[in-house]
Structures are given as structure tokens and as C-alpha cells.
């Protein structure tokens, strides 16, 4: 499935019905995520945050798919879906608080950068081990089905996760019980240094759904409109009782796997340049220009605006102090048991002596 070609030309017959203002809003969000990605890696290199996982080149996947959901639907992320949570109304400052692991971080510094969670946005906290979120998404969908709650769960993962036991567990369970689950695989061709051809002997990732008894579809993951259209069809089907869908979004990780990775050691410059010509942000801008919805002045403004927003969020988050030491003991039990209360008192006393 492809709506927008790399040149910005498009197939009008399958173009989804999205208003002009919404198209521009989605593009601005893609630019924000792209610039946030660049700044995040810079912050790590400067020693201001400890770690960073980027999503350079995968902006269309996360934003196009999340846009197809309703606010009450639940998202189970991997670790490249910051755009999805921003789309759902979480502020840039809240995300930056998590990057800096400060006292206003909802997760109190307990998660790696980018493994963000926000209950207010029905966005489950990510997990560093790959594929563990698939059974969770299926379980939540089954619970909703039992309660006759018309929600859909969408779970993100990479092609590397399809080699894990949890992929089989989640897919098989969803197929048997026909849960309203969207399995969204971002096939970015590299699971750290392992290429996709070393990950599976199957012709595609999407074809794997057939063995579990439901539909698998393949989409151009660098085309935000194709991603949205494909996900919307799967979401509507699931909400109407049609069961799960596996979506394979074919994309490419333009940056390193994380701030600890050097991709030049395992992939060629020629391969990178080939995929840079399919850049999802550039492609969507060309599309907007061809529809006469975007200009050079608009581009200059959105670049300046998003970078200013990021600067402000960084300045704010960097001034917030670290989480208090007592947070080591909170959010463990509804009521703190005696042995944790005792340990907390001992720690506070030790802290007082040192001060």
C-alpha cells in the first residue's frame, strides 16, 4: 500500500479524507519528532542525559498509525513511539522530564529514556526486553472483549521481535480468541546489527499472520497516508468484531539503534543514502507542496517553532531537581508495609547525617 510516492506525487483514488488543517498538523508533529530526535542524541553526547533511543526515519509509522485510533484505545509501545504519545496530547515538557529523569518525571527516573508511559493517554510504559508488550496488548484486548468495551489495542514492535517467543504467544492467542488487536511491526531492516534476512526465512513479516488465522498486510512505512489508511481499516475491522490484523510497515532506521550504537560497523553508506531518498518527512512535505498547502515560509516557521518548543522544554526540565530519595519506596504497594517503612526511615536518617 502506497499513497504518496517519494517524489510527493500521490494516488488520488486512495487518498484518505483528512482535512487540510489536520494534514498540516500531522506534518508539524513529524518535524517536531525529527528535531526532538536530533536534539535527544545531542543531549546524550553532551552528558546531559544518560541514554537515548531515536526514531529517525520512522516518524510516519508512529504518527500515521496512532492517528487512526480513538482516544479511548490503548497503545502498547516498543521504544520508538514518542510521536504517538505527543499526538495523544502529552506535552513536550512531560516527555523531556522523562528524558532528564527529574522529580516531575511520571516514572520517577525508573525507566530508560524514551520508554515513556502515560496513563492519561492510554499509553502503556515501554519495556526494554523486546516483544514482551505483545501478550500484554492481547490480554487487554481480550479483557475489553469480555466486558463488551469497544476499544482496540495497538502494539508496536520491530522485525527483530518476531524472532521472540512472545511474538508467537501474542499472535496465536489473538488468532484463537479473535481479539481486537493491531500488531504493528516497524520493519526498519536492522535489529541492532542483525539484518532482516537473518531474522526470518519467510518472504515477508506480514505473511506470518496467515499461520495464526488472521490477515497480514504490508504498507510503505515511509508514507504517512498509507500507514494511516491501512491502520484505520484494521482498527475499524477490529472494533466491529473482525479480529486482529498484522501490519508490516516497511521503513528504515536512518540513525543508530541507540546512543550506544555505531551503525557504520554493520551497514553501508550506499544503503543509508538509498533510504534517505525515501525520507518520510521530506516525502510528506513534497506532498503538501504539490497540494499547494505548504511553502518555504511555512517550512521556515515550523522549523523555528518546533526548535523553540524543544529549547523551552529542555530549559524547564533541566532545572527540575532529581526525584526525592523516598520515591525508591513509593508506588510499590498501595500501603507501605512495615519493612519498607523501616528501610525508608534508615535511609532518611543516613541522608540527614551526611548533610
Image: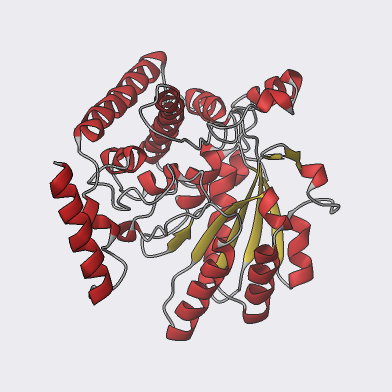
Q: How many marks?
A: 0
Q: Is residue 140 above or below residue 85?
A: below
Which residue is pictured at 18% across the width and 48% down the height?
A: 351
Which residue is pictured at 71% across the width and 60% down the height?
A: 216
Q: Position of residue 104 (x, y in %)?
A: 23, 46
- Image quadrant in which you'd find residue 134: bottom right
Q: Is residue 246 left or right of residue 195?
A: left
Q: Position of residue 135 (x, y in %)?
A: 58, 69
Q: Nearer the viewer, residue 235 or 158?
A: 158
The answer to whether residue 48 is seen in the rendering is yes
The answer to whether residue 15 is seen in the rendering is no
- Image quadrant in which you'd find residue 149: bottom left
Q: Is residue 34 left or right of residue 13?
A: left
The C terminus: image quadrant: top left
Which residue is pictured at 37% across the width and 61% down the height?
A: 122
Q: Is residue 31 left or right of residue 60?
A: left
Q: Nearer the viewer, residue 226 or 347?
A: 347
Q: Position of residue 68 (x, y in %)?
A: 48, 54
Q: Is residue 353 left or right of residue 110?
A: left
Which residue is pictured at 42% across the width and 59% down the height?
A: 124
Q: Position of residue 330 (x, y in %)?
A: 26, 63
Amino acid at each position: 500500500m502506497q499513497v504518496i510516492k517519494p517524489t510527493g506525487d500521490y494516488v488520488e483514488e486512495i487518498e484518505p479524507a483528512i482535512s487540510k488543517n489536520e494534514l498540516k498538523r500531522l506534518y508539524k508533529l513529524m518535524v517536531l519528532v525529527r528535531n526532538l530526535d536530533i536534539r535527544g542524541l545531542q543531549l546524550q553526547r553532551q552528558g546531559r542525559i544518560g541514554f537515548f533511543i531515536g526514531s529517525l526515519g520512522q516518524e510516519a509509522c508512529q504518527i500515521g498509525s496512532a492517528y487512526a485510533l480513538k482516544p479511548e484505545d490503548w497503545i502498547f509501545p516498543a521504544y520508538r513511539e514518542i510521536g504517538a504519545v505527543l499526538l495523544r496530547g502529552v506535552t513536550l515538557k512531560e516527555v523531556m522530564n522523562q528524558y532528564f529523569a527529574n522529580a516531575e518525571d511520571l516514572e520517577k527516573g525508573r525507566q530508560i529514556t524514551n520508554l515513556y508511559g502515560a496513563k492519561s493517554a492510554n499509553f502503556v510504559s515501554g519495556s526494554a526486553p523486546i516483544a514482551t508488550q505483545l501478550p500484554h496488548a492481547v490480554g487487554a484486548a481480550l479483557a475489553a472483549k469480555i466486558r463488551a468495551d469497544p476499544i482496540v489495542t495497538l502494539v508496536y514492535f520491530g522485525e527483530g521481535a518476531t524472532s521472540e517467543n512472545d511474538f508467537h504467544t501474542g499472535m496465536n492467542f489473538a488468532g484463537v480468541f479473535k481479539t481486537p488487536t493491531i500488531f504493528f511491526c516497524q520493519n526498519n531492516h536492522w535489529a541492532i546489527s542483525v539484518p532482516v534476512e537473518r531474522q526470518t526465512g519467510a518472504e515477508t513479516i506480514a505473511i506470518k499472520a496467515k499461520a495464526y488465522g488472521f490477515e497480514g498486510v504490508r504498507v510503505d512505512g515511509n508514507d504517512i497516508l498509507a500507514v494511516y489508511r491501512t491502520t484505520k481499516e484494521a482498527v475499524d475491522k477490529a472494533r466491529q468484531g473482525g479480529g486482529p490484523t498484522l501490519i508490516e510497515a516497511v521503513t528504515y532506521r536512518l540513525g543508530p539503534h541507540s546512543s550506544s550504537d555505531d551503525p557504520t560497523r554493520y551497514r553501508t553508506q550506499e544503503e543509508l543514502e538509498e533510504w534517505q531518498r525515501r525520507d518520510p518527512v521530506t516525502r510528506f512535505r513534497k506532498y503538501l507542496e504539490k497540494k499547494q498547502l505548504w511553502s518555504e515560509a511555512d517550512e521556515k516557521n515550523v522549523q523555528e517553532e518546533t526548535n523553540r518548543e524543544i529549547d523551552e522544554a529542555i530549559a524547564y526540565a533541566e532545572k527540575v531537581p532529581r526525584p526525592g530519595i523516598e520515591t525508591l519506596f513509593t508506588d510499590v504497594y498501595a500501603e507501605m508495609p512495615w519493612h519498607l517503612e523501616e528501610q525508608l526511615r534508615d535511609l532518611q536518617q543516613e541522608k540527614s547525617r551526611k548533610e
